[in-house]
Amino acid sequence: MFSAHRFGRGARSHRPIAARRPVRSAMFVTFVSCIVAIVVALSATAGSYALWNGTATVRGATITAGSSTITINGAATASPAFGALGPGESAVTPLTIVNTGSTPVSLAVTGTSIGTDAASLAVAPSLTATLTQVTDPTRCVTGLTGGQTGALTGFATTGAPISLAKNASAILCLQLALATTAPSAVQGKSAAFTMALTGTQVAP
Amino acid sequence: MIKHKVALILGLVIVLTLGSAGAGYAFWTAPAGVNGSVATKAIAVTETMPVSYGGTLSNATPIAGAITITNTGSVAGAYSTAVTTTSTSGTTALAKAVSVVAWPTASPAGCATASPTGTTTSGTWASFPALTGTLAPASAVSYCVKSSLSSTSGVSSDAVTPTITATLTAGTSWSASAQVSAQQSYTAPAPSVTWYQLKNVATQRCATLSSTAAGAAIVSADCSSPVALDGQAFKLSQSGTTSIVTYPAPTLGIAISNSGNSKPAITAATTSGTGQSWAVSVSGTYYTFTNVNSGRCLADDSTSAGPSLMVDNCFPNPSQQFTLEPIQ
């Protein structure tokens, strides 16, 4: 009988004023608590959620977000040329990475995939990649040591990535080597690969 | 009252959550990539013979030739040669008897008259060391190859074909081969035949030494076949007059004991005495032996194997005619 009055349309008009006050009071408290929480939270972050908040601009009602981009040899995708390889031979190419975004990034090779054609799949198991940071492209020569080495298939960098400030650049020397044990069947073939480099925004 | 508490708790949770979270970072990433391709080289080699090392072998004149190994591939490699030899006779006697020397040259065309110089490699066609080195792509190396007979002792007429195979390798699995070959022949001098069977034309049997003792009878016996140096081997030894020397006792000869007719032939010391001396006449391929002492002719009058050869009055009859069957 009580419930019917509470949720029934006809019962609302007969609800006593004393009974509606606690509800309004609770809603008011909840509203105030939320406002307080939001204000406290926003004051703690002291700005937007983007890390490159220093470059975000607010002019009137317009908010412009920052950017995080890198280029390799002046483009988003590089297609360097390597000399042909015989068993035990190496070929190198310098990769100039430029941070063209508005925030510092850390560079890493996050993976390398091999072409799905038969020639690529045949040659790739005999290929080794070495990635070494150099100070000058002229220092990118075969036999360079000190970088990270691994099979070209699935090659990715590990350990401390390379930090790159805004507008800064780094030169990486990519060396590919054909194993001395490369089978005879891989002669005169070509292997295609795609190496993914990722610049990840650095926390301030 | 309960609703007031719920509202307060909810508010505190929100405050604590947002307050403790600090900044809500969005870590943006910038992807880029390398689309590359790398090609592999290939290995290939050719071998040529600018000057053939084939020809006729002799003691006096060596055969000089040249080979050239060329890297026709795109990868540098190490080359090595190997020699294999076949022969007409199927034996290795001639291959072992041919001395071979090779040396690098910048002028393969001049190898025919060049002398070994610099680093030389020596051996025989039966066993020749490898010629080794490295070759960059599109480069070549040439060698003079000079061969000569080191000795003809025990070497019969034969022909050998040495094949020189050049193999270029890169790494542990890449290799390519090429080869050249040429035949070298050797003709042994004809042996100077000194020993013969004395085969009677009438009986087709051979004069045979019954023993090596002096005075032993020379009998008619079936000719041995194949011919061999045995009791049927005789040599015509000429020193003024002709003696018929026996084998294997060259100090004995066929003699007639006296000058009578129908006297048996026996062995006797090879002296210059007239009993051991014979005048030899030839008619076509038939030989007639006339004893100097008696003037009678050596004859085989037997009708079966066994009887001694005799001397009889000479007359043109097959029983007094012999053919000389070469032994060696």
Image (cartoon, rainbow, N blue to C red):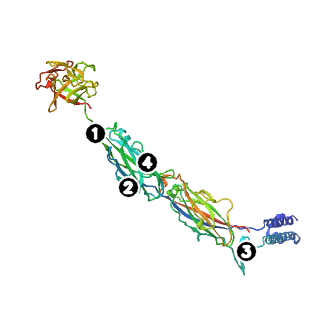
> Is disc 4 placed on a helix, strand or loop?
strand
* Separation of marks 2 and 1 at Cα, in angstroms: 33 Å
Q: Please state the chain letter of the residue tagged with numbered disc 1 in the rendered image.
A: B
Whichever of labels 2 and 1 marks the residue nearer the N terminus, that label is 2
Q: Is residue B79 visible?
A: no
Q: Which residue is mark 2?
A: B108
- In this view of the protein, which residue sits in the foreground, B88 or A92? B88
* Separation of marks 4 and 1 at Cα, in angstroms: 30 Å
Q: Which residue is mark 1?
A: B189
Tell me the amino acid under the disc marked 4.
Thr
Disc nearest the viewer among 2 and 1: 1
Tell me the amino acid under the disc marked 3.
Gly
Query: Tag on residue B263?
Result: none
Disc nearest the viewer among 1 and 3: 1
Query: Tag on residue B121?
Result: 4
Relative to B159, B104 lies left or right? right
Q: Is residue B315 above or below residue B88?
A: above
Q: Are marks 2 and 1 in contact (CB under 8 Å)?
A: no
